[in-house]
Image (cartoon, grey):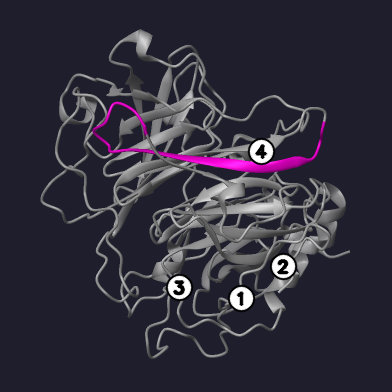
Amino acid sequence: MSDDGFLESLFGKFYHDESLRPPPESGDGEAEDDSWDWHEALVDNAAYMIYERNHTTAQCPVSRKVRGGGVKQDFLQVTFCLSQPPHISYFCMSYTSRDPSQFRCEPTIFATEGNLAVIGLIHNWTLQNSPSCVYFVYRAPILGSQFPQLTLLPHPPSEVFPEQYESECQLGHNEIGILRYRSNSASKHLPFTPPTPTLSHNPAPALSRRRKSHTTGDDYDAYKIATLCYYGTNQYVLYIYDSVADAWSRTPTAFPRPQDAPPEHLCNRVITVGGAMGWVDLWHGILLCDVHVPSPAEEEESPGPRLLHYVPLPEPMQPDNDLRLHGFSSFFRDIAVVNGRIKFVDLQLHASPGSRTPNGWTAVTWSMAPGDSGFSKDGELNSCDLVNPMEPSLFVAHPTLSSHHDGVLYLMTKASMDDSVSQVIAVNMKNKEIERTAKYTTHREACMDFAYTRAIISNFLAPDSKGTTKRPGSVLQGSFRKKLPVINPSTHLPTMGDEGDAMDLE
């Protein structure tokens, strides 16, 4: 038996067989739409463990010990296959040996910001000697002469943990944030206008600046990755990895007043606003903290905590009705930074008394500037007001705000909760119309919990007008124009790098 076959027989596998082939809609043969500006993509959370190469491919050399004392060397690679929303893009992760048994389960995107993505994975051969999950940073090029890079993110060492906690930190999915900054900036600070007067009042940077391609001078060459860990009542510790120092640090946090702390906070999303991050409990509120401004412990001899500020979210609209929807918070709610404002959406599915079938839906959007004390209502849309109506009995979930097109909301729709065939629709809330539709097969998890991540990394991976960034043999997944349909529940479908030194991960 081979070493890799031995590993799979010893530890087993927890990935879906469908992850070993591309999603069915990726080869639908429709014509590409040249109008896509690549500014935004919806990327499937979990990787397809297949060998694909195109101009987005990045590799990282990896070596590991095998039975008999030898060393096996291979290359881990990541490739993005991008399509215009609401089509769902996907990413592939594999070894050049093309053996999926080295993975215990599908690699997952943990966070994205700008040209960066943090991807976590579990190897069968690291379970007994390393942290259960290892993390890699995918870095799309910011200059036309560069290539994508894939690097191992060092795990927080034991010395950065509080003495009373001996276990190592595991970075949670959707619990880490990424802050990009300029390493050669004369200022130590990125300006951030907080929601309370206890922090600085500099204007927030222009987050909405877009580029036609990655060749036009994005100069954020450094980044920080941060997670906020809860250690008891009102006790949060901030862990930050700085790419310049190539090291993790630990900083205590505190609320301006103990009564400002939320009674509960379960983070399931992280946003970045200027030099701050917000750890979001989509049911309850946001914990905001400046992660780029040096803490008192870093500026002075005496230690001091970073301040946390809590901003409540609007109350959920979804009632406890006969639909019995008790899914994740992302089933109904989403948050994003759009044109420098924090935007929030809440979705409600309607149902007649005693019915387990939906009868339409309502989406409400809210927003706040970084200096505001709370959210103000922006707009509301009821499905019955759409100019091109959809079948009201469809289940609708995962409202996803566009970070590029203000007023556009993406929704996943299904005829039934356990149907593997669904579609994603792009709804213009201002014009009250369905702008685009796309098939999305959730064949790996036939439920509404399995979804995708909004990312602008596509903006850094767009080929230029001459296609000069496209590597030989690459295949670009395009976008597709479709005539707007009335959604039919009976069919569920529209009727119309650089290579560095080898990394030993054992």
Ranked by sequence position, the earlier of labels 4 and 2 is 4
Ranked by sequence position, the earlier of labels 3 and 1 is 1
State the residue position of label 2: 494
Relative to 444, is 32 above or below?
A: below
Q: Indicate the amino acid at tag 2.
A: Pro
Q: Quadrant of residue 85?
A: bottom right
Q: Which mark is residue 194?
A: none
Asked whether the viewer can see residue 379, the reply is yes
Ranked by sequence position, the earlier of labels 4 and 3 is 4
State the residue position of label 1: 482
What distance separates the C-alpha of mark 4 from that of mark 2?
Answer: 21 Å
Q: Dot 1 lies on which element? A: loop
Residue 319 image point, x, y percent: 65, 26
Q: Is-magenta flag for residue 374?
A: yes
Q: Residues within 10 Å of mark 4 (few under 14, many from 20)?
A: many
Ranked by sequence position, the earlier of labels 2 and 1 is 1
State the residue position of label 4: 349
Q: Which range is magenta?
A: 355-376
State the residue position of label 3: 497
